[in-house]
Image (cartoon, rainbow, N blue to C red):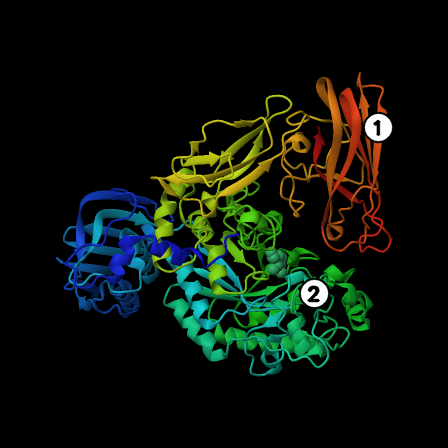
Amino acid sequence: MTKPGQSIKRSLMACPALFLMLAGCAAPPRTIPQAARPGRLDITPAPLRADSRPGAFLIMRATRILVQEGRPEVMNVASYLRDMLGRPTGYELAVETAAAPAGPGSIALCLEDLAGRLGPEGYLLDVGPNGIEIRAAAPAGLFYGVQTLRQLLPPAAERPASMLGTGSLRVPCASVEDRPRFSWRGGMLDCSRHFFPKEFVKRWIDILAMHKLNTFHWHLTDDQGWRIEIKKYPRLAEVGAWRVDREDKHWNAREPQQPGEPAAYGGFYTQDDIREIVAYAASRFVTIVPEIEMPGHAKAALTAYPQFSCTGGPFTVPPGGYWPITDVFCPGNDGTYEFLENILTEVVGLFPGPFVHIGGDEVNKAEWQRCPKCQARMKAEGLKDENELQSYFVRRVEQVLIAKGRRLLGWDEILEGGLAPQATVMSWRGTEGGIAAAKAGHDVVMSPTSHCYIDYYQGDPSQEPLAIGGFVPLRKVYSFEPVPDALTPAEATHVLGGQANLWTEYIGNGKYAEYMALPRLAALAEVVWSPKSARNWDDFAARLQGLLARYQAADMNAARSAYLVAIKADSAPGGNRAAVSLETEVPGLEIRYTTDGSDPGPSARLFKKPVVLKKTTTLRAAAFGDARRLSPAVSSERFLVHAASGLTPTMARPFSPSYPGGGPRTLTDGLLGSRDHADGRWQGYEGTDLDAVIDLGRPRPIHRIATRFLQNINDWIFLPSTVEFLVSENGRDFLKVAEARNDVSPRTADIVIKEFAASLAPRRARYVRVLARTIGAVPDWHFGAGGKAWLFADEIIVE
Ligand code: TNX
């Protein structure tokens, strides 16, 4: 398993050039070596236009940063630039004002009347042999010009140590014109499920800013922790910010706080911390959107102030995942609105941005149905159901925000029961909510789980640190399009942009957060910044190595999962064979493999076309570039080869389209499934038996038939009650030769993988039939009682 945090030290040792730079002090003047692709301008997100020019400008001790007289608002960008260049060089460049900033040996920052051409965030960057000029209509544009300049420097310039002595920093000559496609370019960090210290929050803001992202959606409250000091309600932080420490247990297996047990795990941001972070973000042109979750995802708040729930509590702050959580704010109680208004008053006082996010997602309404106050409210207001009650609640909160001059933003559930008049919707359950809201004339931010959930796996789960599930690899993020085809151009103007979300149930520290975010934030940044026409995966993938070198130099823990080799079953040429194809997300690499169990090196066999295996084999593969292994780990897969390998079974009842595994040949592809039913190796049957016939092509001796099933009762997946094995000469008349019964209890809480097998007295047969009987319905005692039980199979093995 690749653990985040390991890679950086290792590669530093392996890179003598960087090591020398760090250690070297008496060395002669020198220039830091250039990035991986000389002559190419590797700028991410890709700019509107970038032209490479001959020559270079050398940043030296004498280089001056020039700003216009009478434009104090530019000083902030100038000092950011001075600090940025100061880190690798050790120079503190002079910042000077001038009436017309230009001149040899200078980097000039100029505000000009360019708003029509560049908008408030665009810029022009010109690097010539004698100087650098960044021009923009507003300081934000200058700042983004500086970020582009940063990427023209060698990656090692990210290293926070003076390396140059008397040397210079080389900037290749270039001319860039750039402006963003969307105004909302967001990155959410969930600081509730795990608390992240102030220093990391600032680092997160730096990471957003370096990718030209301008919106930090700060998820400050949830069931598992309240993270913002509210003066009027001190218990929110004193009580709501703390839970018992169960970090040694899986998120979903943490027992609640026991009586007398102190809750000492967590933390919160004081109002001073928040002001400091808001100012830090502003200096990097990042607007913070605070999220205060209501009416659901609020158990931490209700632990502190249970009187605003329907039941009155008492509660404890959950140390992990419990589902559903029915304790939510009581919309029947007027005190609830007063409480929330007072909280929002303090929130609005701290965060100057136009939006406040009020959550609104996944509200369990069970208590509302039982609560006399809620029911009375529904009657008094003529609300026909609890969805309308939620909508009533959101409208009231929106009134509060509007009165304070702010805009309400909520997850797409706020559409249910009717959208508040001026609300903005953040669409996470796909883009449908966003489409509906945009068609109704509301602004929307697109952040669908399918492309934007960077808490999901980015590589094969068996090669990644534990994550919540899902699969959103880099290329998937890159393929995101925030404006759905379903919108007319006029409606599309309501799409403010897109956002990546880092939920942190499984992410307990900053290094892991970086691993999940990088480089996927770079892909998202290109989606929301670059012109749609510039979107080109191959080009982005070619820039990735340089970007990763930058992250590494900046001590940012980025994932290299896009270089992992995916080992896939390919169409096999008939029975007794498995065929294997190998691929990486990043195209054009050398993929090398072995079949003898050893790790492939740079001279191992090169993959060119599907590899055909004639016997059970473990295949190991990795990707290489310039004789260097680029894959963060060697991928390995065992292919079982048997008489049915590569043949297509005929199914009496189809597999579920939701869980096809690898399609019709899944049960004979030689790949066995993991404990994860969604790993692509398991094929699912919803409520039906599995009834498969395999034609071996001609009568063949058979001495064993086996099949494998998964049980995971949390996901309604149960082992079959029996598996019958039948054979036939003609494909019509089948003889039952064996039956295997299930001896594992359906109540077994842990995941079970069981092989049902039969050894036969040797016999010849052309057709083999496997009939696995489902238990049918989910048993009475189960939370899904009466629903359809699933069967999940990965292979039918005939020997
Ligand atoms: C859904 S996205 C949630 C979060 C979880 C996330 C995990 C949303 C509005 N609600 O509470 O953390 O899934 O991926």
Q: Tell me residue 256's x, y (percent).
A: 70, 71
Residue 526 lies left or right of residue 453; in this view the side is left
Residue 153 in sight here: yes
Image vertical order of residue 373 relative to residue 287, above or below: below
Find out if the beta carbon at label 1 lies less than 8 Å from the nearest ligand 1 atom.
no
Label 1 CA crowd tier, 10 Å (few <14, some 14–19, many 20+)? few
Image vertical order of residue 594 relative to residue 717, above or below: above
Residue 233 lies left or right of residue 99; in this view the side is right
Q: Quick one: SS at disc 1?
A: strand
Q: Which residue is mark 1?
A: 737
Name which of mark 1 and mark 2 comes first in the sequence: 2
The residue under the point 56% across, 60% down is 503
Q: Tell which of 210 and 778 is nearer to you.
A: 778
Image region (quadrant) for ligand 1: bottom right
Q: Which residue is mark 2?
A: 392
Q: Looking at the picture, which amino acid does disc 1 mark?
A: Val
Q: Quick one: SS at disc 2?
A: helix
Q: Tell me residue 184's x, y (percent).
A: 47, 56
Q: Is the C-beta separation of discs 1 and 2 under 8 Å? A: no
Residue 121 in sight here: no
Q: Residue furthest left?
A: 104
Q: Tell which of 219 and 382 is nearer to you.
A: 219
- Marks 1/2: CA distance? 65 Å
Tell how many labels: 2
Residue 180 lies left or right of residue 388; in this view the side is left
Residue depth check, mark 1 versus mark 2: number of the one nearer the observer: 1
Residue 393 lies left or right of residue 746; in this view the side is left
Disc on res. 405:
none
Label 2 CA crowd tier, 10 Å (few <14, some 14–19, many 20+)? many
Q: Quadrant of the C terminus?
A: top right
Image vertical order of residue 623 relative to residue 118, above or below: above
Image vertical order of residue 756 relative to residue 44, above or below: above
